[in-house]
Image: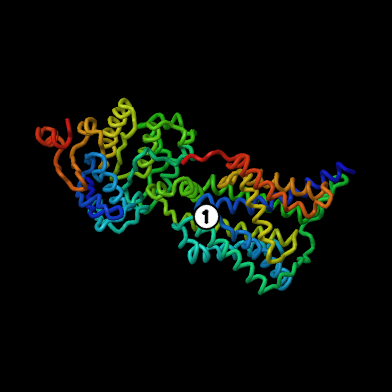
């Protein structure tokens, strides 16, 4: 019984890890390339969740299609936000950048509350896949979808960075923006591209959120805090570290919720414990190394 | 036969004017060396040419095509590449990705030579880059990184190559090797080279023309042989 519970808990953790990895890798890509920590990243996820929800509930668009549309919509919104707003604080100091993205985050949350009330909603779509039964353990179909799509997003991002010309140019801009300019890279375009990719993955991740979580204006805050913990674990700016960080955080969170008495409300706190521990013990992250400047 | 012409003037850091004016003109297959002591304005002049330092005036032309309006990042695609000082590389990328990235970044309106052929040419000049192709650039020695920096610039098939103190911080034997290779690159690729140097001795052997900068002004310019043979100038400006 105990071991069934353990396996069940770990399997569920694995599925949410897919979602977390997708969100965290977008965040870490944006930071790695532009140096901006995008505190509003979670709100793009939240907006993607609402969009997928409304597309299904009001118009009847199937959730998978809604996810894709949410991704495209958040790409477009990222473009607007970057060109209209973030590109103007790029050359300013970090405090201004942090305030700018926190301000954007608060603005988007409040607009969502005004438009849709703070109430939590559930998307009543039938599960996209049948549940997976492994002995006594059952993994709900939607969790499988979250795992598959999350991993696909994450793997797609890694593939893009490693195997396309634009991905290579992004890596040049991330490594040394001034030198990248001298090599012929339009660095501003690369900064924008990193936010477009971040927006795309955030929007699709929002669709995943609508599948397994309540849709409400603060859902992005919870998720982005976890993403920060994951990024701290995996190493800031390291997309490769994001997956391992996501699995570790998700497992720690689920195990706490399952096995610690009253742990359901402690699960989220685990993220913060991890952030603090990493910052104290190994500030470069478990798998990050001191980057050569 | 291509010809690279540049004129920059009026570069200041805060109120300190470090560059008054510099005029250069180099034919393809020739090298112009900009000599001057520390703080004479060499680095500023080269950065001003590339456009990464603001100046009151900047004129740039290659083969009669006016490139003055180009943003710094557009220059490599037009055949003008600056190799900055300090043997700078993309430190967390492999040698291969440094070269591949430079090739990809310089893609522009020109028809590019395929990556493999350019890399083979670069590795012909600097064989160490082939042996170390998978090594992370930041872990290499200063000399190797300088070779990578120049190799990276060659991936853009430059018609004008601008080098900022490539010998700085390198052991004499490496400098000698590097300059022999630079002379070969000049001869074989036919690109025009502009090089800032403090290392007067080696530079005089491979340069064709010389400009001496002093406190941001051109103190002397002319064919290298003339400057070297001019006893008074030698002692006054070159210290040899």
User: What subunit carries mark 1?
Assistant: A
Q: Position of residue B132 (x, y in %)?
A: 46, 31
Q: From this viewpoint, which residue is outermost toward the right?
A: A1
Which of these two is toward me, B160 or A104? A104
Q: Residue tagged by mark 1? A: A36
Where is residue B215 shown, x and y percent of the image?
21, 46
Is residue B67 at least partly visible in the picture? no
Q: Is residue A158 left or right of residue B87?
A: right
The answer to whether residue B132 is seen in the rendering is yes
Q: Quadrant of the C terminus of chain B?
A: top left
Q: Is residue B64 above or below residue B33?
A: below
In the image, B121 versus B179, the foreground residue is: B179
Taking B80 as reference, is A190 left or right?
right
Q: Position of residue B225 (x, y in %)?
A: 14, 34
- Image quadrant assignment for residue A102: bottom right
In-front residue for pair B155/B200: B200
- Residue B31, horizontal then vertical, whole percent: 23, 39
Classify residue B233 by image quadrant.
top left
Position of A60 with respect to A195 (left or right) is: right
């Amino acid at each position: 019984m105990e071991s069934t519970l353990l396996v069940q808990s770990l399997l569920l953790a694995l599925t949410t890890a897919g979602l977390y990895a997708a969100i965290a890798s977008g965040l870490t890509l944006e930071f790695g390339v532009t140096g901006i920590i995008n505190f509003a990243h979670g709100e793009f996820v939240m907006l993607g969740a609402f969009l997928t929800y409304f597309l299904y509930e009001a118009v009847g668009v199937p959730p998978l299609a809604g996810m894709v549309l949410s991704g495209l919509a958040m790409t477009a919104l990222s473009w607007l936000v970057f060109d209209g707003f973030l590109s103007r604080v790029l050359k300013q100091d970090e405090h201004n950048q942090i305030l700018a993205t926190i301000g954007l985050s608060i603005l988007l949350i409040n607009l969502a509350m005004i438009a849709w009330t703070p109430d939590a909603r559930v998307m009543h779509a039938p599960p996209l896949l049948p549940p997976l039964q492994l002995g006594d353990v059952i993994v709900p179909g939607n969790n499988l979808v979250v795992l598959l799509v999350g991993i696909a997003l994450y793997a797609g991002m890694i593939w893009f960075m490693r195997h396309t010309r634009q991905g290579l140019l992004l890596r040049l801009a991330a490594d040394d923006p001034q030198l990248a300019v001298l090599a012929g890279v339009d660095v501003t375009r690369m900064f924008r591209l990193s936010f477009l990719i971040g927006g795309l993955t955030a929007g699709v991740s929002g669709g995943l959120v609508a599948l397994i979580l309540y849709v409400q204006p603060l859902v992005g805050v919870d998720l982005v805090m976890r993403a920060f913990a994951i990024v701290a674990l995996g190493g800031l700016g390291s997309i490769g570290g994001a997956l391992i960080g996501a699995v570790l955080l998700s497992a720690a969170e689920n195990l706490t919720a399952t096995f610690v008495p009253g742990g359901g409300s402690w699960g989220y706190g685990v993220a913060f414990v991890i952030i603090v521990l990493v910052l104290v013990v190994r500030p470069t992250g478990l798998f990050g190394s001191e980057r050569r400047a | 036969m291509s010809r690279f012409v540049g004129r920059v003037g009026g570069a200041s850091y805060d109120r300190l004017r470090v560059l008054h004016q510099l005029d250069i003109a180099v034919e393809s297959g020739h090298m112009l060396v900009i000599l001057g002591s520390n703080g004479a304005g060499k680095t500023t002049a080269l950065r001003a040419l590339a456009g990464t330092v603001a100046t009151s005036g900047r004129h740039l032309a290659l083969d009669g095509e006016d490139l003055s309006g180009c943003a710094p990042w557009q220059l490599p695609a037009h055949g003008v590449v600056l190799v900055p000082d300090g043997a700078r590389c993309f430190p967390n990328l492999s040698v291969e990705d440094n070269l591949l990235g430079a090739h990809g970044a310089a893609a522009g309106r020109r028809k590019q030579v395929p990556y493999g052929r350019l890399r083979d040419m670069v590795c012909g000049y600097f064989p160490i880059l082939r042996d170390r192709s998978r090594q992370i650039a930041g872990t290499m020695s200063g000399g190797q990184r300088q070779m990578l920096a120049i190799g990276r610039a060659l991936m853009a098939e430059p018609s004008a190559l601008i080098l900022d103190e490539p010998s700085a911080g390198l052991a004499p034997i490496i400098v000698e090797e590097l300059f022999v290779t630079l002379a070969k690159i000049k001869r074989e690729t036919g690109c025009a080279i502009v090089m800032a140097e403090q290392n007067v001795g080696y530079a005089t052997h491979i340069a064709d023309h010389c400009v001496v900068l002093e406190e941001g002004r051109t103190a002397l310019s002319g064919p290298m042989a003339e400057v070297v043979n001019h006893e008074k100038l030698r002692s006054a400006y070159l210290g040899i």
